[in-house]
Amino acid sequence: MAAPSPGYSVTARISAPAGYNTTSEIVTVAGTAGAQITALDVVESHHDRMVLDLTANTSSPEHAEEVKTALETLEGVTVNHMSDRTFLMHLGGKLEVVPKLELRNRDDLSRAYTPGVARVSKAIAEDKSLARKLTVKRNTIAVVTDGSAVLGLGNIGPEGALPVMEGKAALFKQFANVDAWPVCLDTQDSDEIVNIVKALAPVYGGVNLEDIAAPRCFEIEARLREELDIPVFHDDQHGTAIVVLAALNNALRIVGKQIGDIKVAISGVGAAGNAIIQLLQASGVTHIVAAGRAGIVARDHEHTDPHRKWIAEHTNPENLTGTLSDAVKGADVFIGVSAPDVLTEADVAAMADQAIVFALANPDPEIDPALAAKHAAVVATGRSDFPNQINNVLAFPGVFRGLLDAGVSDVSNEMLVAAATAISENVSDEQLNSSYIIPSVFDGDVARDVANAIVEVAQRTTQSS
């Protein structure tokens, strides 16, 4: 059974006989059934009966039902209702629009709206650059998806993607005070997506592309970057790459290896894998071997996908062929952005001494972290219930905060490397250990430092050009 998670937290409203041992019996039975108890509240207490709310983390909806069944084996106990706390959190959505000013009287209304607002509109019509100063454009981004590659759920469409995009927007606000809004498009035609985003662009200071399937995501990002005068950032590519590089920087500090000397094996050659390869190379990694479903990507193979062809031409210097196991043999670093259980314990044992394993497939990683840790010096995953969570939240809020503050439209590799360095440096020498190579997503300094790093690069680029 998977470990209990807050993502499957439930509250059971329980009716039980009054007695000194009632609460302890309920907790014992729920715990024995595998629930992780987080709260127990007495709602009502009568001479013969008690009503309690038991809150617990479970591992799945089925597990929650098993806990309910176990509780009802106690004599006189009834579970009146089981609430799913995740669904309750999403009732009515997670966002709202709140005005930045109070409209207290006719005077305020005359300036915020008609007739005064007409003067502002006229000024912007004459000089469109004023929109960044006088409207929400200055601090607002669009979180754009077509719902074709949502989390680990696949092509679930725009409605299914909406809760995820709402969450993304909430994270932008929470961690970097960036106003973001979900834009879930009911089309998966690349031309339509590009045209729609271009038409919406006057409202926004930036575009965060999210959960768009490869290879269309590459084309859409490239075209929007070319045709818009605001920054366009595909988080599934570049956000992942930034945090991977940040974690790798610190993992290498632990094992005492230099980034220019390491051999890296990558499982997964989609959006994330492609961006990771490019950013690692921009940081000095020269020996990368990538593997997809069909095995190692090599120059001798036919590649109809231009992005796969690019990988073949720019990695695998020895032109190896074979399986992922062949790619991993002797490697210093494994980075997985692919699928569960594609890496074996024997594969990790065959890696170089002081190996580093980043198994980032979600929710189930490429290898059980406990197995990887038998042979690797540092292990990281994408999950919050294991040490060293490599989470994009460390990157994208600060990146956009910096891009908006700098007022730039181009997102360069130099900016991405600087962002990764800023994240790495939030882990001090005293804090650094094999179970702590990356800061917490709740570290308030990270987004600020990433933003400052982006602004510094932008200013340097402006001065040199």
Image (tube, rainbow, N blue to C red):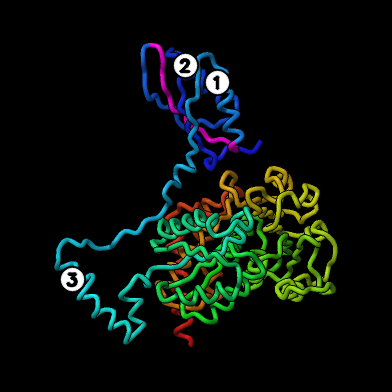
Residue located 78% across and 68% down the image: 297
- The answer to which of 193 and 219 lies nearer the viewer is 193
Residue 203 picture location, percent across and down: 40, 73
Q: Amino acid at mark 3?
A: Ser
Name the disc covering residue 110, or none: 3
- Residue 86: x %, y % from top left: 49, 43
> Is the stretch drawn in magenta largely helix, strand or loop?
strand
Q: Which residue is mark 2?
A: 22
In-image side of 159 versus 448 (left or right): right
Crowding near the residue tagged with mark 2, few <14, some 14–19, many ≥20 C-alpha atoms within 10 Å: some
The N terminus sits in image quarter: top right
Q: Return the x and y of residue 249 as percentages of the image width and height.
A: 60, 61
Residue 60: say if magenta.
yes
Distance from disc 1 to disc 3, alpha carbons, whole Å, reads 63 Å
Q: Which residue is mark 1?
A: 72
Closest to the camera, between mark 3 and mark 2, is: 3
Q: Residue at x 74, y 47 (%)?
A: 375
Badge nearest the viewer, 1 or 2: 1
Q: Earlier in the sequence, mark 1 or mark 3?
A: 1
User: Which element carries disc 1, helix, strand or loop?
Assistant: loop
Q: Which residues are magenta?
A: 48-61
